Amino acid sequence: MKRILQFFLHLIWIVFLTIVTQIGGVVWLISLLIGRFWKKEIRYKKALLFTGLYLISTLVIVPLIAPIFGRMSVQHTHKIRPTNYATVLLNRNYVKPLLNQVLQKTAQSLKDTPIEIRYLDANFPFIDEFPLLPHLSHDDGEKIDISLVYQDTSGKMTNRKKSISGYGSFVPIKKGEIDQTARCKKAGYFQYDCTKYATFGSINQDLILSEKYTKQLILAFLKNKEVGKIFLEPHLKSRMQLNSSRIRFHGCRSVRHDDHIHVQL
Ligand SMILES: [Zn+2]
């Protein structure tokens, strides 16, 4: 009985690691295997083996072999960085080379501005159609989420963000604007604002959206003809007077996009 329970606990853990990091489940299995053959008794042996192997895989091995499978990690520069480094540690920072080029070109076109591109979830390193949950469409190396740009109470632009994860801090609707969240929830899509539970903590609550610089960031992405679509909440699209047909509404099945921008090839 104990063995069966142990087996199921391992299974749940492996599924969890795979969903969150893609490679974690396999790394866990390999570390169990090594632990079995390596007889030396050490305290927390399993956990230490797994952590060591996972970090080596994530920081060294996967970045080297992902290009063989057509993806690479997002190239960091002083203008391109993750909003939270956990994105990198969880292998959620992989894109096709073309999307990396788009990011570099966009950063280049923003070189005379204070705007930095802070990215959120992109894709996993391997296997097309392996979704990066909860984003069902981030499964082909062609999608990346980007943080909005904010300003402080004095009106000065900042590259700080409003939540630890980068998700879940929404831009309130102003009077007269389309309340897409209310519409979607009324239609029964209760998941529409579920990212409010994914902030991992709210920070910098004094910041507000910088319409000027967020618009500039979106226009910089749109300069690339390789960008096929950008998802943005309707009230922000109209507030910032963005009228490109490539800026779309993502549909009620998705989640609200007024805490980040979704860019895809
Ligand atoms: Zn997205």
Image (cartoon, grey):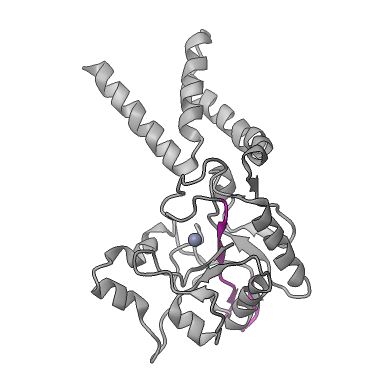
**What residue sits 45% from the left and 70% below the top?**
257
Residue 106 is left or right of residue 29, and the answer is: right
Say if 264 sits above or below 148 in the image.
above
Left or right placement of residue 106 versus residue 125 in this view: right
Count the marks: 0
| Residue 59, quarter of the rendered image | top right
Q: Quadrant of residue 124?
A: top right
Q: Is residue 44 visible?
A: no
Residue 239 at x, y percent in the picture: 50, 86
Query: Which span of residues is magenta-colored?
Result: 141-158
Q: Is residue 242 left or right of residue 12?
A: right
Q: Residue at x 42, y 50 (%)?
A: 133
- Decide which of 157, 59 is in the foreground and name it: 59
150 part of magenta stretch: yes
Q: Residue at x 55, y 40 (%)?
A: 126
Residue 33, horizontal then vertical, whole percent: 48, 16
- Let me know if residue 237 appears in the view: yes
State whether residue 167 is above or below residue 246.
above
Is residue 45 located in the magenta-colored stretch of the structure? no
Q: Position of residue 217 (x, y in %)?
A: 64, 74
Asked whether 168 or 200 is in front, the reply is: 168
Please state the horizontal and vertical placement of residue 55, each as a whole percent of the image: 59, 34
The answer to which of 218 and 7 lies nearer the viewer is: 218
- In this view, 127 is above or below 215: above
**Which quarter of the rendering shows the N terminus?**
top left
